[in-house]
Image (tube, rainbow, N blue to C red):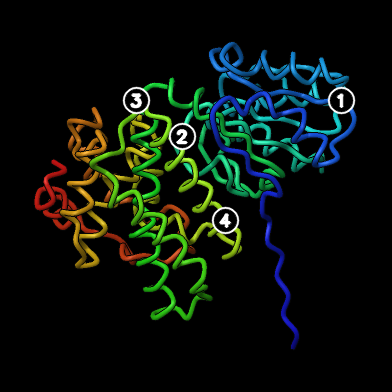
Amino acid sequence: MKQSKWMQLPRSVVIGHNVLFEVANVCKELKLSGSAVVVSGPTTRYCAGEQICEILSGEGYEVQIAEVRSTNEYDIDEVVTVVEEANAGFMLGVGGGKSIDVSKFISYNFDIPFLSVPTAAAHDGIVSFSASVIQDGKKISIPAHAPLGIIADTSVISSAPKRLMAAGCGDIISNYTAVKDWELATRLRNEVYSEYAAALSEMTAKIILDKAEIMKPGLEEAVRTVVKALVSSGVAMSIAGSSRPGSGSEHKFSHALDMIVDKPALHGEQCGVGSIMMMYLHGGDWKAIRDSLRMLGAPINAKELDIKEEYIIEALVHAHEVKEQRYTILGPGLTESAAEKLAVTTGVI
């Protein structure tokens, strides 16, 4: 039987100093027409969102801006109203995860293109084809459009809080354990595996791991490296047709923490710490991951995550229940004693 597969890949990726001013040119190159809706946060609208509105307006586009503070149903409905009233032809997510996720989700439902304009390099959601939203009080991941284009201004991103770039590095480094989980699922569950996607994902993680010592927040060259790595990670997922190359047991651990802790740490921070422990379970070099995260200024234990040790144990025990269909090294789950031993051995608690 003939097999076919669709890959959602960005058609235009612009990374560099002051490339925010290229937004109109990118829109024209991609043949985007009609009115535009810019989705941005309460802070990011002033560092980039309003500027993009002015640039597009100056080139003849009708532009509306919608502000989001969360990815819950209320905020999404508010943006939907703006999109409907503007009869939008395309959308731009300008900001961090929330702005991009809301744009991604709504553009998918309206079947219109969207551009990703990140103001921080905190995670690979800037290019992935899934959106993280809150439904019924729970954060879930749902299918969405991959961005038609990405505009990453390194001068803007380098001015973001240092913690955000370290979190992005943690998300990328966690590709190592995600791929190991994927390989395990292939051996034990005969899951479809892509060597190309896995190789790209691992290579991306290796670049960050090898350059950890010189990756200083605030330096545009470092930001450029991280953004390229995040884009490559997203491309690996597009090639695979799933988030497998960048999401495994370490992401399950992070999502479990999100459900347990009132104020969880950043996604990439939690995935980084999770990757330390999951690499230990895989019998790999977990100390290299821990040391690289430390050099990057990312958290490596519960104290630095500002999360109680008992929550780490609880998340490890329940992590296998997240996306149960996705087989990982966690298998049917860890006992409480095994979870505690894992966390203690790796220095997470």
Image-quadrant location for residue 102: top right
Q: What's the CA distance linking mark 3 and mark 4?
A: 25 Å
Q: Residue at x 30, y 45 (%)?
A: 272
The reply to whether callout 4 and callout 1 are in contact (CB within 8 Å) is no
Element under disc 4: helix
Query: Residue 213, percent across and down?
Result: 23, 41
**Is residue 262 visible to us here?**
no
| 171 up-or-down from 94: above or below | below
Task: Determine which residue is flagged by label 4.
Answer: 235
Q: What's the CA distance linking mark 2 and mark 4?
A: 16 Å
Q: Residue at x 16, y 58 (%)?
A: 338
Q: Say whether disc 2 or disc 1 marks the residue closer to the N-terminus.
A: 1
Q: Is residue 173 left or right of residue 213?
A: right
Task: Determine which residue is flagged by label 1.
Answer: 35
Q: Say whether disc 1 or disc 3 marks the residue closer to the N-terminus.
A: 1
Element under disc 1: loop
Query: Residue 38, percent across and down?
Result: 72, 23
**Is residue 91 visible to us here?**
yes
The amino acid sitting under disc 1 is Ser
Query: Residue 26, percent across and down?
Result: 74, 35
Q: Say whether disc 4 or disc 1 marks the residue closer to the N-terminus.
A: 1
Q: Residue at x 23, y 27 (%)?
A: 306
Q: What's the CA distance linking mark 2 and mark 1?
A: 28 Å
Question: For the residue carrying disc 4, how many other residues have a C-alpha within 10 Å: few (<14), some (14-19), or many (20+)?
Answer: many
| 161 up-or-down from 229: above or below | above
The amino acid sitting under disc 4 is Val
Q: Nearer the viewer, residue 205 or 225?
A: 225
Task: Determine which residue is flagged by label 2.
Answer: 121
Quadrant for the N terminus, please.
bottom right
Q: Say whether disc 2 or disc 4 marks the residue closer to the N-terminus.
A: 2
Question: For the residue carrying disc 1, how many other residues have a C-alpha within 10 Å: few (<14), some (14-19), or many (20+)?
Answer: some
Task: Determine which residue is flagged by label 3.
Answer: 162
